[in-house]
Structure formats: structure tokens, C-alpha cells
Image (cartoon, grey):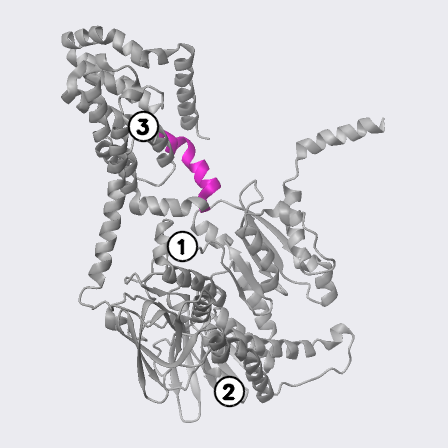
């Protein structure tokens, strides 16, 4: 704590102690004011400027220190100075005093509060930045809210002091006039409670609620403006239409059918979307075969001689497609039809905000109407504008599954999760893989030691890593293809048989006629916190809306899209729709070693200015990892300094994607490392690493002073 802050706190406590010790509050009572009214008025007539100045100063001090008596001071303003000058003096004195209290709370307490409750205060600070002036004005209008409490609490937020000052000045004016006017009739007042009758309080409450009602009215008017030029159907064929049958669309339609809504699900390609057909499922099947190929090379480490094997790439890809077929029934037309969902396979196009035209496989077209529509069209691979690339028959994560022969020389563009997973898979299956990444390291969203661990393993697998290298062009000659890269000002040509583009994915916003009706899109479909587009009855979820492109996040968003779209009128009665909760989102990269994360890592915490402690446990020390020959990796936990509250966890190593689940549960339900430590974990398992990292935190925070006293007690017990 700085010297200035200490002095300020000491001054505040001294002033408050003086008020209590000398019983100064007696001079801020109604009885005292009524008894001294004539004397004070006479002094004002003799020395108007001096008395007004003293009054202003006392009012500011009373308000700044939150001393009870502001109401009596306001009455005194009317009694001594009359209505006009009383209103002027009280208006400025109360605002200046309130702003002093606001700034005092900010200077003394805000940093400590923000450091301790930073995550919880983020949405509040965002709301204050966006709508703070509006809500402060409303609170100032309603006298049932203690003004001193408003001053102190808002000082802990990010509201600008000038905004607080002028909004308070305007918002308190109505109440000031009422009290000052009452002060002019001081002789008739018997108690402070008599100033504000129930009818007058009711009027103030209505006055305070009015801006909220007005805002709602403005929202309704804006919503109706969006529909201008469109004819609203008198009735609807369905309650809900869902466009896209990936994870987001499937879960949305499943929920709708479960609550007995009439729902139609439209998919132009294969059911299950990218995850089933070209993403999560096939890639993990390919990675499993690649891991097996890698394990064959390690037979001697497990006591086996003459272990050998060569990957049959055609058979590997056959297995991949068999895995897809085995999982297909979970996402099939038949299953969802049995669940009560009408499934149409065809091209959807928004004719108007409520009507979807579906072109079916036989060329016929159906027009469907629904009260609500959910857009869940997913995302597609980004293809960068590199000269010659589009002429090179490039592969993406969607098209590589048609390969039947192993590429001898494969270039992978991209060092993110998709590029890294596929790089390792093809390298272990026997391709010579060159991975090109423009950034200085792989997996840029992870901490640097995570990137290093993954890069080292890729290099052990024979991958030629080209980090900090920019793809300049693709040269397609008659007998050879080359990727031209540039690094440190030098260019180099890399020969390849196939090139795989894995530089990210972009939302499919150019499908189903969104622009035709005016749905706002940028890089994604623009949605609010409730997943509504600019059309309040049209929602979007999953990869097409962001902000995360994970299957599990798409399913998470789908619940909000389904419930908000189907039950909007009922939810309005409870105060509004459900806002999507992105507070605890886990993810994993399924390379070897696996990387899993939830919450903050160190680079995120530093960028956001969040203070943290780090506790790390090396999995190389774990009994089960040693027994399995997988003794590598670590569990890293970020916590609030001095507390066991978990801010984020990164796990690198075998089964990281499974191990992270315990921390996801802990963070979601506010459980700290002490709870993890007190939970029994089976021995010997990889899950024990979670307990051991909690134990490492506990060891670092043991009560040294208490232990010294305990040591003395034991010594005394020994005699």
C-alpha cells in the first residue's frame, strides 16, 4: 500500500472517529435544525457568501464520508436559502460529495477488489462501460436506493468520474427539489419519513422505472424497424427451422423435439457435419493408427524383440471410414426422425425472415415458415491467396480423406491444432512431412513451453519444422511442385507431392441467403449475448457464430439457441433470455504429447493484466506414467495469489484431454485445489497428477508460523 493511500485511509478513519467521539451527528438531526432555523437564517442574511460557503463545505464532507445526515442538510438548504438557491447549493454540494466518495472508494479499494474478483467483475465492467450512465441515472431517480451505497459501489467499477458526476447531477435533481422544497416548510415537518409519502415514493419509483420501460420500447421499435418491408405471416408451419446438421444444429433440433416443438432440420450435405465426416472423428481415427505405428517402433523398450510393421495407408484410410460409418447412426436421419425431428436433405435459402425455401435432391422446392430460425452452418477451411496454390490440387482437412496412397513428401501449411495433429499423423505413418508456420512457434495460443514440448516431439518423429517462414508461392512444373517460402529475407523451394492447407477455418456466412434478407455478418454471423442476430427471432450458434470453433462449444451454444428461440415470450416474464456462459471452456490438441487447457494460461493472464501464481507438477514423476513408458509432460495450474481458486489449467502429456475434465468441473462449480487434494484418486492412474499438483500448491502455502508452534508443542510433549 502506498504512503498516499495510507494517509488517505487514516484521514477518513480520523474524521469518522471524530464524528463519533464528539457526537457531531447531533448537529445533523431534524430537531437541531428546527431549533436553530431562525439563527441560521439571520446569519445568512448578514453574511450570505460566508454561510453559503460553509454550508457547501459541510455538505460535501458529510456526503463524501457517507455520514448519515444528508437528508437533514438538504432540508436545511431549503430552510436557510429558499427554494432556488437551496436547490443550486444542494445540487452541486451533493454531486461533489458523491464524486469524492466515488473517487475515495476507487483509490482505496478498487485495485484490491479487481484483483480478487476480476473475473466476476468483467461482465459488470463491460456493462458499466456500455450502459453505466443509463443505469446510474435510473438509480439516482429512485430514492429507495441508498445514495451513499451507489457512490461507493460504482467507485469499484470502471465508470469514468466525469460520467458519474454529470449523471448524478442530473439524476438527483428531482429528489433535491422535493427535499429542498420541504425544507422551506420546515415548521410543518415532524419527521423525515413524512417528507416522502407512499404516493410520492411511488411516483419516484415510476419515474425511475420509466427509463427502463422507455429502453424496452426503443428495443421493440428497433426490432420492428428490422422487419420493415417484410410481411409477417399470420401463422407458421413450424415452431423452429434449423439450418445445418452439425453438432450445433443436431443439438438444437434434438432439444426442440424433446420439448414437443415442431422442428425441421435442413442439411445440404452429410448429417453430422464436419466433426463426423471430416474433422474430429476421422482425424482421431487417423491419429490412433499413427500412434500404433509409432508404438511398433518402441517394441524393444517394452521387452519385445524383432517387432516390426509398416503402415498400409489404404487399410488405414479404410479403417478411418469404417469408424465414421460406425458413428454415423448417432447423427443419422433415421435417429432424428425417430426423435420427432423432420429432417430435409437439401439446400436451404432464406426467402424472407420467416420463410425458408428448400431445394431437395430431386430438384423440387419446399417453402417452410417458422416463428424462429437457427443458423448452424458451421465453418470451412481457410484457403490463403498464395500464387499457384489453387492450381496445385491442394488438400484441406475436409478433402484429404479421399487419399488412398500415402504422400511421400507432404507439406503442411499451418502450425495450429489441425495442422499439428495431421503433421504428426502423416509423419508417423511414413510421409516425409515439412510443416510451415509463419509464427515463431507452433500452437501460438498456448504457453511457450507447451509449444516447445510439441515441437521437440514432432522433430523426433522426423518432421522438418519451418517456423517463422512465410509461404510466398507454389510453383507447379511439369514434373515437380514446389512451395516457395521466405524466412529472414531468404527464399527457399521445398518439393512436395501433396500440400495440405491447415491455416484455420472461417464461418460459412455466405450460405442459405443470409445477405438476401439483411442478416448482419462480418467474419461470423453477428449475434448478441443471447445468440440473436439483428433479427430477434433468428439465432445463430456453433462455428458460424463463434467465438470458439469446438464441437463441444457448438453443443453448449445450441442449448441457449434452442431455449431462447422457443421460449422467448415466457423468458421475457422472468427478466429476459438466457445469456451464453463462456466462462469455462476447455479444449485439447490431440497430438503427442496431448495438450489440454481450460481457463487462463500464463500468456493470457499477462495480456489481461491478471495477477496469478503458478504451480507445476511434472508427469515424469508419476508412477503410472513411468510404468506405461509415458513419463513426460506436466500439469500447470494458475491460481489467485494466496488462494486455491483456479484461474486456469494446462496439461501436457498422455490423456491430457481426459485429465482436464476434473479441473473443468472444479472451475465450473467454484471448487479450489484444496477440494481436488481432498478427493481420493485411484492408484496408480494418470489422474493422480491432478491431485499431486494440488498437493504441490498446498506444500507451497503451508502455514510456516503455525508449524513452528506445533513443532514446539511436540517437543514439549516429548518432555
What quarter of the picture does the C terminus occupy? top right
Residues packed near mark 3 inside 10 Å, few (<14), some (14 to 19) or many (20 plus): many
Q: CA distance from mark 3 to mark 1?
A: 37 Å
Q: CA distance from mark 2 to mark 3?
A: 71 Å
The residue mark sitting in front, 2 or 1, is 1
Q: Which numbered dot is residue 159?
A: none
The secondary structure type at the circle numbered 3 is helix
Q: Is residue 698 above or below residue 106?
A: below
Q: Residues within 10 Å of mark 2 (few under 14, many from 20)?
A: few
Let me know if residue 463 is in the magenta part: no
- Location of residue 474 by image quarter: bottom left
Residue 115 lies within the magenta run: yes
Can you identify the residue that label 2 sits on? Answer: 403
Where does the image place residue 428, in percent across and percent down from the top left? 60, 78
Q: Mark 3 = which residue?
A: 100
Magenta-colored segment: predominant secondary structure: helix
Q: Which residues are magenta?
A: 104-119
Q: Is residue 201 above or below residue 568?
A: above
Rounded to the nearest whole Å, what is the CA distance between mark 2 and mark 1? Answer: 44 Å
Regarding residue 589, the answer to whether it shows in the image is yes
Contact (Cβ within 8 Å) of mark 3 with mark 1: no
Q: Residue at x 37, y 54 (%)?
A: 571
In this view of the protein, which residue sits in the foreground, 703 or 240? 240
**Disc nearer the start of the sequence (2/3):** 3
Amino acid at each position: 500500500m502506498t504512503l498516499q493511500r495510507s494517509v488517505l485511509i487514516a484521514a477518513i478513519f480520523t474524521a469518522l472517529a471524530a464524528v463519533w467521539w464528539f457526537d457531531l451527528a447531533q448537529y445533523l438531526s431534524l430537531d437541531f435544525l428546527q431549533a436553530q432555523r431562525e439563527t441560521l437564517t439571520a446569519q445568512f442574511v448578514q453574511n450570505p457568501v460566508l454561510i453559503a460557503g460553509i454550508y457547501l463545505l459541510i455538505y460535501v464532507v458529510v456526503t463524501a464520508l457517507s455520514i448519515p445526515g444528508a437528508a437533514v442538510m438538504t432540508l436545511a438548504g431549503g430552510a436557510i436559502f429558499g427554494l432556488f438557491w437551496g436547490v443550486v447549493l444542494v445540487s452541486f454540494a451533493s454531486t461533489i460529495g458523491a464524486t469524492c466518495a466515488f473517487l475515495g472508494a476507487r483509490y482505496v479499494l478498487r485495485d484490491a477488489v479487481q484483483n480478487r474478483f476480476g473475473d466476476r467483475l468483467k461482465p459488470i465492467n463491460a456493462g458499466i462501460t456500455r450502459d453505466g450512465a443509463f443505469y446510474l441515472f435510473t438509480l439516482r431517480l429512485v430514492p429507495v436506493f441508498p445514495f451513499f451505497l451507489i457512490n461507493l459501489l460504482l467507485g469499484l467499477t470502471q465508470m469514468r468520474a466525469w460520467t458519474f458526476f454529470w449523471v448524478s447531477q442530473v439524476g438527483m435533481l428531482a429528489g433535491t427539489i422535493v427535499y429542498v422544497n420541504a425544507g422551506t416548510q420546515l415548521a410543518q415537518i415532524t419527521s423525515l419519513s413524512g417528507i416522502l409519502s407512499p404516493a410520492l415514493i411511488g411516483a419516484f419509483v415510476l419515474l425511475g422505472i420509466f427509463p427502463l420501460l422507455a429502453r424496452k420500447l426503443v428495443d421493440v421499435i428497433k426490432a420492428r424497424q428490422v422487419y420493415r418491408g417484410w410481411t409477417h405471416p399470420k401463422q407458421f408451419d413450424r415452431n423452429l427451422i434449423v439450418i445445418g446438421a452439425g453438432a450445433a444444429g443436431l443439438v438444437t433440433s434434438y432439444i426442440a423435439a424433446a420439448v414437443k416443438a415442431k422442428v425441421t432440420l435442413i442439411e445440404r450435405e452429410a448429417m453430422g457435419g464436419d466433426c463426423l465426416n471430416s474433422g474430429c472423428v476421422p482425424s482421431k481415427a487417423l491419429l490412433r493408427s499413427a500412434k500404433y505405428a509409432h508404438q511398433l517402433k518402441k517394441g524393444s523398450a517394452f521387452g519385445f524383440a524383432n517387432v516390426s510393421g509398416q503402415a498400409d495407408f489404404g487399410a488405414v484410410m479404410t479403417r478411418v471410414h469404417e469408424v465414421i460409418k460406425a458413428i454415423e447412426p448417432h447423427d443419422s436421419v433415421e435417429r432424428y426422425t425417430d426423435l420427432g425431428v423432420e429432417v430435409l436433405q437439401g439446400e436451404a435459402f432464406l426467402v424472407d425472415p420467416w420463410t425458408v425455401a428448400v431445394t431437395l435432391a430431386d430438384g423440387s422446392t419446399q417453402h417452410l415458415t417458422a416463428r424462429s430460425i437457427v443458423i448452424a452452418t458451421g465453418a470451412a477451411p481457410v484457403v490463403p491467396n498464395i500464387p499457384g496454390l489453387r492450381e496445385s490440387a491442394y488438400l484441406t482437412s475436409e478433402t484429404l480423406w479421399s487419399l488412398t496412397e500415402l504422400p511421400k513428401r507432404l507439406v503442411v501449411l499451418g502450425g495450429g491444432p489441425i495442422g499439428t495433429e495431421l503433421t504428426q499423423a502423416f509423419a508417423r505413418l511414413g510421409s516425409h512431412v515439412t510443416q510451415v508456420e509463419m509464427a515463431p512457434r507452433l500452437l501460438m495460443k498456448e504457453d511457450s513451453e507447451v509449444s516447445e514440448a510439441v515441437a521437440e516431439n514432432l522433430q523426433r518423429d522426423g518432421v522438418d519444422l519451418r517456423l517463422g517462414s512465410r509461404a510466398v508461392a507454389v510453383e507447379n512444373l511439369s514434373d515437380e511442385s514446389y512451395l516457395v517460402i521466405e524466412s529472414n529475407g531468404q527464399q527457399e523451394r521445398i518439393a512436395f507431392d501433396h500440400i495440405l492447407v491447415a491455416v484455420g477455418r472461417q464461418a460459412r456466412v455466405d450460405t442459405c441467403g443470409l445477405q438476401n434478407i439483411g442478416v448482419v455478418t462480418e467474419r461470423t454471423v453477428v449475434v448478441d449475448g443471447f445468440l440473436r442476430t439483428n433479427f430477434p427471432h433468428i439465432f445463430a450458434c456453433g462455428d458460424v457464430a463463434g467465438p470458439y470453433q469446438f464441437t463441444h462449444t457448438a453443443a453448449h451454444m445450441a442449448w441457449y439457441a434452442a431455449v431462447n428461440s422457443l421460449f422467448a415470450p415466457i423468458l421475457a416474464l422472468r427478466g429476459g433470455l438466457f445469456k451464453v456462459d463462456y466462462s469455462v471452456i476447455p479444449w485439447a490438441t490431440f497430438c503427442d504429447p496431448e495438450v489440454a487447457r481450460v481457463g487462463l494460461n500464463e500468456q493470457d493472464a499477462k495480456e489481461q493484466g491478471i495477477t496469478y501464481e503458478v504451480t507445476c507438477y511434472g508427469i515424469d514423476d508419476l508412477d503410472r506414467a513411468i510404468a506405461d513408458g509415458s513419463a513426460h509432460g506436466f500439469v500447470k495450474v494458475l491460481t489467485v495469489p494466496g488462494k486455491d481458486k483456479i484461474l486456469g489449467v494446462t496439461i501436457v502429456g498422455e490423456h491430457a484431454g481426459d485429465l482436464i475434465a476434473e479441473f473443468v468441473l472444479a472451475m465450473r462449480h467454484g471448487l479450489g485445489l484444496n477440494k481436488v487434494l481432498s478427493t481420493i484418486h485411484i492408484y496408480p492412474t494418470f489422474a493422480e497428477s491432478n491431485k499431486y499438483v494440488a498437493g504441490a500448491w498446498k506444500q507451497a502455502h503451508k502455514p510456516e508460523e503455525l508449524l513452528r508452534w506445533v513443532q514446539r508443542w511436540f517437543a514439549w510433549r516429548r518432555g
